[in-house]
Image: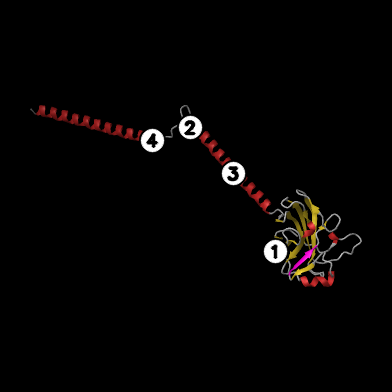
Amino acid sequence: MRKTRRRISRISLVSCIVVALALAGWSLAGCGSTTKKSSSTSTTKLPPGATATEAQSTTATATQSTAATEAQSTAATAAQSTTATQTTASTPSTAADLAGAHFTVVGATRPNTNKSVISSSQREVPGDYFQVELTIQNTGAYGLIDLSQYSFRLQSPGIAADTYSDYYGTTGTYGAYVSEHVISATLEDLTNLQAVTYKVKVGETVDKVLVFFDLNPETNAKNAGVTKDNTQLIIRKVSGTDYGTQVAIPLTGYPD
């Protein structure tokens, strides 16, 4: 009887050990399965037939291409900015239309001598002057235009128009009284320094003409009250069609 009990006890012990080993194996198998699944989730999928090295090379090439495109875009933007700056800094060409004539100021300078408007036999006089160069086009709105019917004037708060008669008398080539701060001058041909009084055909453009103003007829000192920012050229129709009309062209922005 005792032997039978011992045998049963041994069988029970062996069964317990077998069950325990089976449970341990199942537990290890479960852990291994979880680890493998996690590893599979973190692995980057590659295209069919591609290796990890090839994938890295493709990624690097794409990054370099993007960087090159951004660099080209930056360079193009800089070039456009430079072009815009150069365009803004160019010499202005302000224009106005009056009675069939299109007037464009192509230059406005402030020389300190009258040398540019005298012949070799005339006396050069130092002083403070304002030279305005123009082109004039007949737009065809009125047929022929007669330039003798236009008056060319300079207006600035620094001009004392009543001082011109003492020096120039009744000759208003370089300045004659119009009103308190306005003087007139003669339109001249730069090639021969003769007064421009001829007619212009439809479509014709006249260039190399100018008006020359003396800003300080009583002294050769600079007239501090006259600046390009407060000065404008006034062109007025003094006879013929549209008599009494006028246009004003600001002289701001023109280099000295």
Q: Earlier in the sequence, mark 4 or mark 1?
A: 4
* C-alpha separation, residue under disc 2 versus residue under disc 3: 32 Å
Q: Which of marks 2 and 1 is in front?
A: 1
Q: Mark 2 touching mark 1, by CB under 8 A?
A: no
Sequence-first disc among 1 and 3: 3
Provide the residue designation for mark 3.
73
Residue 73, by quadrant, is top right
Q: The residue under label 4 is which amino acid type?
A: Thr
- Pick whichever, 17 or 248, lies toward us: 248
Q: Do the residues labelled 2 and 3 touch (CB within 8 Å)?
A: no
Q: What element carries label 4?
A: helix
* Crowding at mark 1 (Cα within 10 Å: few <14, some 14-19, many 20+): few
Q: Name the residue tied to disc 4.
A: 41
Mark 1–mark 3 Cα distance, whole angstroms, equals 39 Å
Mark on residue 52?
2
| Label located before the other in sequence (2 or 3) | 2
Q: Nearer the viewer, mark 4 or mark 3?
A: 3
Residue highlighted by disc 1: 229
Three-letter amino acid code at the position of disc 1: Asp
Q: Say which of 108 and 12 sits in front.
A: 108
Mark positioned earlier in the residue sequence (2 or 4): 4
* Amino acid type, callout 3: Ser
Q: Main secondary structure of the magenta part?
A: strand
Task: State which region is magenta.
Answer: 181-185
Q: Quote the CA–CA distance across marks 2 and 1.
A: 71 Å
> With 70 as the anchor, is 182 left or right in this view?
right
Upstream in sequence: badge 4 or badge 3: 4
Q: What element carries label 3?
A: helix
Q: In this view, does 68 lie to the left or right of 87?
A: left
Measured as percent of width and height from the top left, residue 122 is found at 90, 63
